[in-house]
Image: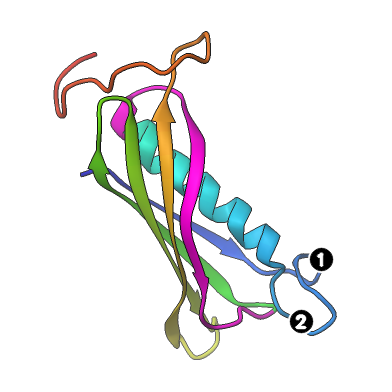
Amino acid sequence: MSEARSLEVVFPGDTNHLGTLFGGTLVAWMDRAAYYAASRRARGSVVTRKIDELEFRVPIRTGDFVELVATVESEGRTSMQVTVEVHREDPVTGTRELCTTGRFVMVSVGDDGVPRPLPPAGGTA
């Protein structure tokens, strides 16, 4: 299965008055990570169809590193289910913890924006 990883840093402009990351910013980062994994598998453009589930467990604070790991878990003819796990890391202590998980449905599309079948896994388009 296809996987993608990305790393972000939480800056003060990314946070609310409590110093925790805005949920909308995190969802955008997660959507981007899902895009990376799905477009790798589709070998082309993909779009987000829906977010099936999103659970915020632990707050992410200013200065934290945020690692996003997106994995294509299953696929249909044109769509893929991508799980995104988000871990926060304290850059001083190295302490890591799972903060958020989400499930995204991504659809492979052609240049015209119309859904297109996924290419064979490991093959050519």
Instruction: From the top left corner, tell me how far across and down residue 107 is, in percent.
Output: 41, 30
Q: Position of residue 60 (x, y in %)?
A: 61, 78
Q: Is residue 104 above or below residue 98?
A: above
Is residue 56 a member of the stretch shown in magenta?
yes
Q: Of 36 and 120, which appears nearest the observer?
A: 120
Q: Which residue is mark 1?
A: 13
Q: Earlier in the sequence, mark 2 or mark 1?
A: 1
Provide the secondary structure element on which disc 1 rests: helix
**Identity of the residue drawn at 25% across and 25% down:** 77
**Total numbered circles:** 2
Q: Quadrant of the C terminus?
A: top left
Identity of the residue drawn at 45% across and 88% down: 95
Q: Report helix, strand or loop for mark 2.
A: loop
Query: Disc 1 residue type?
Result: Gly
Residue of label 2: 19
Disc number placed over residue 53 in the picture, else none: none
Looking at the image, which is closer to me, 95 or 44? Answer: 44
Local crowd size for mark 2, using a 10 Å CA cut-off: few (<14), some (14–19), many (≥20): some
**Vertical order, 51 against 92 (above or below):** above
The span shown in magenta is: 41-61
Q: Residue at x 53, y 68 (%)?
A: 66
* Quarter occupied by residue 69: bottom left
Q: Residue furthest right?
A: 17
Is 82 magenta? The answer is no
Compared across the picture, whether 57 is left or right of 123 comes to right
| Label 1 crowd bin: few (<14), some (14–19), many (20+), radius 10 Å | few
Q: Which one is in front, 31 or 63?
A: 31
As shown in the figure, which amino acid type bears the numbered disc 2?
Gly
